Image: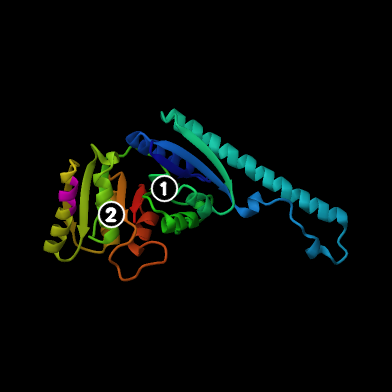
Amino acid sequence: MDKILTLLDGSEYSESVCHHTAWIAQKLNAHVVAMHVLGRREAAPATDLSGALRLGARTALLEELSALDEQRAKLAQAKGHAILEDAKKILEKDDIPSVTLRLRKGDLLDSVREFDGEIRAITIGKRGEGADFASGHLGSNLERIVRISKVPVFVASREFRPISKVLVAYDGSASAKVAIERMSTSPVFDDLDICVLCVGQDSVKAQKTADEAVAKLSAANIKASSRVEAGDPEDVLSKLVAEEGFDLLVMGAYGHSRIRTLIIGSTTAAMVQSVKIPVLLYK
């Protein structure tokens, strides 16, 4: 059975992540692995502060600080278990009976790498626990996951709604071609309304590019239409998503832009930040 790894941190996005994960799992008949990772500080045992308290610090103070560290670690673990139990209840309510809970300690990427070769996709929230204070930035964990992931990454929006209308941002780049290839073999996209969009000043070239992607999907019995728009890709995509009722944006993580960040392509990063719908990223 396919597995989906869902990463949860207890943020405002976590419930939406669970609902979107359930939607995908139902399409794939997949098992869900729900994971929460305690950071090194959260999972740390009592800290040895003796080196910092040599100048006359009393033993009682040292013991009190160590006890506080130990208590914080216990609370972090209890919080982690609570996050996972809540996630399991949501997934089971969404008719996903096959759920495994994993509480890990240490580095997030190391924990994710444990599942290399076992999972079909990763689901994660757009931003983490500081979401309300970082509206202009991607969650740092999201950026790190996209960077190392060998499978598609589904980035959940804050609110869940059923997905029926999909916009595919296609530019003919390597990662965009991977997106079309993976879509053509995935039951997730059966019976969805799919629009393949190519943004370019050369309308003839853009139409040809979009039609090639549609032909690939059609050959796999996935219904799709092509569309061409001129203008700045970020502006065009944002406008269409806001005005035409799309429920999911599919993109390659890297495009043709000469300026590529160390994490993901600049247009991709802008879209994940700005749109209020989920984004599915392929590399």
State the residue at coordinates (59%, 42%).
80
Q: What quarter of the picture does the N terminus occupy?
A: top left
Quarter residue 193 falls in: top left
The majority secondary structure of the magenta stretch comes to helix
Amino acid type, residue under disc 1 in the picture: Gly
Q: Is residue 85 left or right of residue 26?
A: right
Residue in view at x 23 percent, y 45 percent: 184
**Residue 264 quadrant:** bottom left
Whichever of labels 2 and 1 marks the residue nearer the N terminus, that label is: 1
Bounds of the magenta segment: 213-217
The secondary element bearing badge 2 is classed as helix
Q: Quadrant of the C terminus?
A: bottom left
Q: Residue furthest bottom?
A: 258
Q: Nearer the viewer, mark 2 or mark 1?
A: 1
Task: Choose between 237 and 123: the one closer to the eye.
Answer: 123
Q: Residue at x 84, y 65 (%)?
A: 54
Tell me, yes or no, whether the two marked residues, 2 and 1, touch with CB atoms within 8 Å: no
Residue 151 rendering spot, x and y as whole percentages: 38, 50
**Residue for badge 2:** 178
- Counting labels gives 2
Q: Which residue is mark 1?
A: 117
Few, some or many C-alpha atoms within 10 Å of disc 2 (few <14, some 14-19, many ≥20)? some
Residue 85 can be seen, yes or no: yes
Mark drawn on residue 152: none
- Is residue 157 something one can see in this rendering? no
| Image coords of residue 180 (percent x, y) | 24, 51
Against 272, residue 35 (above or below) is above
Q: Residue at x 45, y 31 (%)?
A: 98
- What residue type is disc 2 on? Val
